[in-house]
Image: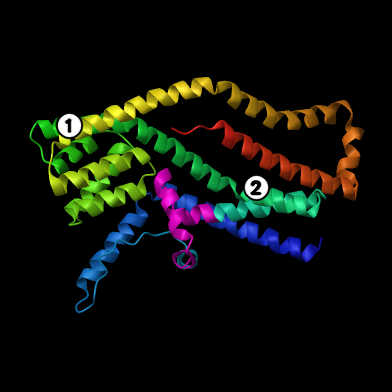
């Protein structure tokens, strides 16, 4: 490979790593720096006379001005930023964008230096660059699963507060104070939006957008209908929590019955790689032609792609949603 091209990639990687190190140092050394800067900016805007103010809250996507400017103008940024908020990580989106570039370029350079087939080097770089996104998806999945487990108790708490004479927002505030993250955190943000003047229906709609949980939609729909038509909201909350608990019981039974299928999917996914690993120790020359011959490289690349597709299909078939 051209030495100039490799030098440029190494320079970009070094630049990105330096920026990540400075950002990590600022985040650890000054954890409240961004919030203080936003407050100073708000005070400065209040001193300006005759200027139309933007009342919408703007989220800083990166502390690097140029990167923040670029991310603000990309259409995919909104979905990625929502993923960061749903994962509840303390770092902004720009950090994960830089980390993606560093991991992807580093993996590509290392694999190219090892004389790996060029398309395979590109695939390796893409896979390593995909790791930050996979981490955010995993964090979001675990947080949403925890939210689903907290919903029945949270709805029961709201129902008991309504029976005790509290208002609907008062019951939500009580649940936000008593429940931990993520239920308490998300409901507290909804209460803050209502206190700032947002309509209750709109605040509940924002809650549904932030939280990827189908059971939450039942609560929001029931609350909105009750506010328009009337009814015993406390009884509705208890019925919804009871339905959710029964669904959890049914899901547990399905998981028990599908254990064999899920275990078979894991074994079938690991088996080809395990066989290749064992053969590389028992008879290294047996696999040498596969990775040295041009035709063998193409066959290995096609087989790898087909295995990834097969693993994805097996996992999708083994998952049963209720």
Give the quadrant of the N terminus.
bottom right
Quadrant of the rendering where the C terminus is positioned: top left
Q: Could you say where residue 164 lies in the image, as x and y percent from the top left?
A: 9, 31
User: Which residue is labeled 1 in the image?
Assistant: 235
Dot 2: element:
helix
**Residue beneath disc 2:** 127
Residue 85 inside the magenta-drawn segment: yes
Q: Residue sitting at 67 percent across and 42 percent down? A: 309
**Can residue 89 be seen by looking at this rendering?**
no
Q: Which of 140 and 212 is in front in this view?
A: 212
Q: Which colour scheme is used?
A: rainbow
Q: Residues within 10 Å of mark 2 (few under 14, many from 20)?
A: some
Q: Which of 149 and 243 is in front in this view?
A: 243
Residue occupying the point 74% across, 42% down: 304
The residue lying at 68 percent from left, 51 percent from top is 125
- The residue carrying pointer 1 sits among few (fewer than 14), some (14 to 19) or many (20 or more) residues within 10 Å by Cα, namely some
* Residue 22, horizontal then vertical, whole percent: 51, 55
Q: Where is residue 30 shown, x and y percent of the image?
A: 39, 51
The residue segment tinted magenta is 70-97
Residue 201 point in image, percent of width and height: 22, 52
Between marks 2 and 1 in the image, the one whose residue lies nearer the viewer: 1
Count of marks, rendered view: 2
Residue 260 position (above or below residue 219): above
Left/right placement of residue 41 relative to residue 313 reads: left
Quadrant of residue 262 within the rendered picture? top right
Q: Is residue 250 found inside the magenta-colored segment of the image?
A: no
């Amino acid at each position: 490979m051209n030495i100039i091209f490799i030098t440029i990639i190494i320079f970009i990687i070094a630049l990105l790593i330096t920026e990540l190190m400075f950002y990590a140092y600022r985040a650890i050394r000054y954890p409240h720096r961004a919030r203080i800067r936003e407050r100073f900016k708000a005070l400065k805007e209040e001193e300006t006379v005759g200027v139309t103010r933007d009342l919408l809250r703007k989220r800083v996507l990166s502390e690097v001005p140029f990167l923040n400017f670029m991310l603000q103008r990309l259409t995919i940024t909104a979905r990625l930023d929502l993923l960061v908020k749903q994962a509840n990580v303390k770092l902004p989106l720009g950090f994960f964008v830089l980390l993606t570039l560093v991991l992807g370029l580093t993996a590509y350079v290392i694999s190219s230096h090892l004389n790996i087939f060029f398309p395979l080097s590109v695939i390796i770089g893409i896979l390593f660059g995909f790791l930050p996104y996979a981490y955010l998806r995993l964090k979001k999945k675990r947080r949403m699963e925890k939210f689903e487990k907290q919903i029945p108790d949270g709805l029961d708490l709201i129902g008991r507060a309504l029976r005790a004479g509290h208002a609907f927002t008062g019951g939500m505030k009580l649940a936000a104070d008593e429940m931990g993250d993520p239920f308490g955190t998300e409901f507290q943000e909804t209460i803050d939006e209502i206190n700032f003047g947002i309509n209750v229906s709109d605040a509940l709609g924002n809650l549904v957008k932030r939280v990827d949980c189908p059971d939450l939609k039942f609560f929001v729909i029931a609350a909105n209908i009750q506010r328009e038509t009337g009814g015993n909201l406390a009884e509705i909350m208890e019925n919804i929590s009871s339905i959710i608990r029964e669904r959890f019981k049914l899901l547990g039974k399905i998981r028990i019955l599908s254990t064999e299928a899920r275990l078979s999917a894991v074994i079938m996914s690991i088996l080809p790689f395990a066989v290749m690993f064992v053969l590389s120790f028992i008879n290294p020359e047996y696999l040498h032609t596969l990775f040295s011959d041009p035709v063998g490289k193409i066959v290995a690349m096609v087989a790898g792609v087909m295995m990834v597709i097969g693993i994805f299909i097996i996992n999708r078939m083994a998952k049963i949603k209720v």
